[in-house]
């Protein structure tokens, strides 16, 4: 029986009451501070000041705990809008916001479909907004938006982690790399790259995300209209 259907143990008088919700909230707090390496049933039990065996009555494995954590975050990813385009944009933007708030989420989205109730609610809202559109268009369109969001937010989180590891933000890294690029471009071997670096727009992550999302939604709209 999956964790979504398995009942919790009955309440009993103990010095430290437990629940799945309390366990998950504690795991979220640990992950938000120190990443997924800080999350295990043993570490969560220690944070709750209980023995690890008590947690197994509520959550059988670390994988179940991670699934519950992802679904808890999805409670805040509820797309809204009056059209399929507004709903898909809202889904993309709220997912990005959630990943920025919970950096570890970037490592868990994009695999097998999440089956928790909050995640299913999000999927239902998204697909309901596309009622009337042929399913042969809906399925790849939704997959394309999901792939775009996952790739974009993982790139942003990778950059954030690189800044922490190197001690240099993006502008500092660009300044340090600039002389090398200028010497390389002076050889004339990379004229297209040189033009983009020197003359192209320098967008921040939010602008890049929004414009790229518009390109994708424009393409979906053109396919639906056609």
Image (cartoon, rainbow, N blue to C red):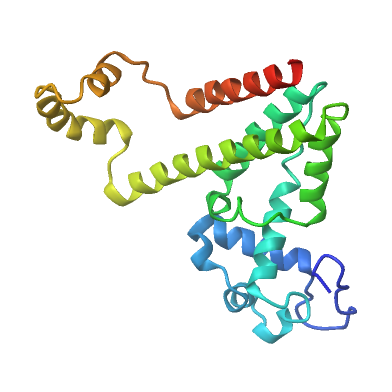
Q: Residue at x 75, y 15 (%)?
A: 225
| Residue 100 percent across, percent down from the top left | 55, 42
| Residue 16 percent across, percent down from the top left | 75, 78
| Residue 84 percent across, percent down from the top left | 78, 25
In the foreground, 215 or 47: 215
Kindly tell me whether residue 211 is visible in this rendering: yes
Q: Is residue 167 left or right of residue 59?
A: left
In the foreground, 224 or 84: 224
Marks counted in the figure total 0
Q: Is residue 211 left or right of residue 129?
A: left
- Snapshot quadrant of residue 63: bottom right
* Image position of 192 with respect to 115: above or below: above
In the foreground, 203 or 51: 203
Kindly tell me whether residue 51 is visible in this rendering: no
* Image position of 41 with respect to 95: above or below: below
Q: Residue at x 62, y 42 (%)?
A: 98
In the foreground, 161 or 186: 186
Quarter of the image for the C terminus: give it.
Answer: top right
Q: Residue at x 84, y 41 (%)?
A: 124
Q: Residue at x 79, y 75 (%)?
A: 17
């Amino acid at each position: 029986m999956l964790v979504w259907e398995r009942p919790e143990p009955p309440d009993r008088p103990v010095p430290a009451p437990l629940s799945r919700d309390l366990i998950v909230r504690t795991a979220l707090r640990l992950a938000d501070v120190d990443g997924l390496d800080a999350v295990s049933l043993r570490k969560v039990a220690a944070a709750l000041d209980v023995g690890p065996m008590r947690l197994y009555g509520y959550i059988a494995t670390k994988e179940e705990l991670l699934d519950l954590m992802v679904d808890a975050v999805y409670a805040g990813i509820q797309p809204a809008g009056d059209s399929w385009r507004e709903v898909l944009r809202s889904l993309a933007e709220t997912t990005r916001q959630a990943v920025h708030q919970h950096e570890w989420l970037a490592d868990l989205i994009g695999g097998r479909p999440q089956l928790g109730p909050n995640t299913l609610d999000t999927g239902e809202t998204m697909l309901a907004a596309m009622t009337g559109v042929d399913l042969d268009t809906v399925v790849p369109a939704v997959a394309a938006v999901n792939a775009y969001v996952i790739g974009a937010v993982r790139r942003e989180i990778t950059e954030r982690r690189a800044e922490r590891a190197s001690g240099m933000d993006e502008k500092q890294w660009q300044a340090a790399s600039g002389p090398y690029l200028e010497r390389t471009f002076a050889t004339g071997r990379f004229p297209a790259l040189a033009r983009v670096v020197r003359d192209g727009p320098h967008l921040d992550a939010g602008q890049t995300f929004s414009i790229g999302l518009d390109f994708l939604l424009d393409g979906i709209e053109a396919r639906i209209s056609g």
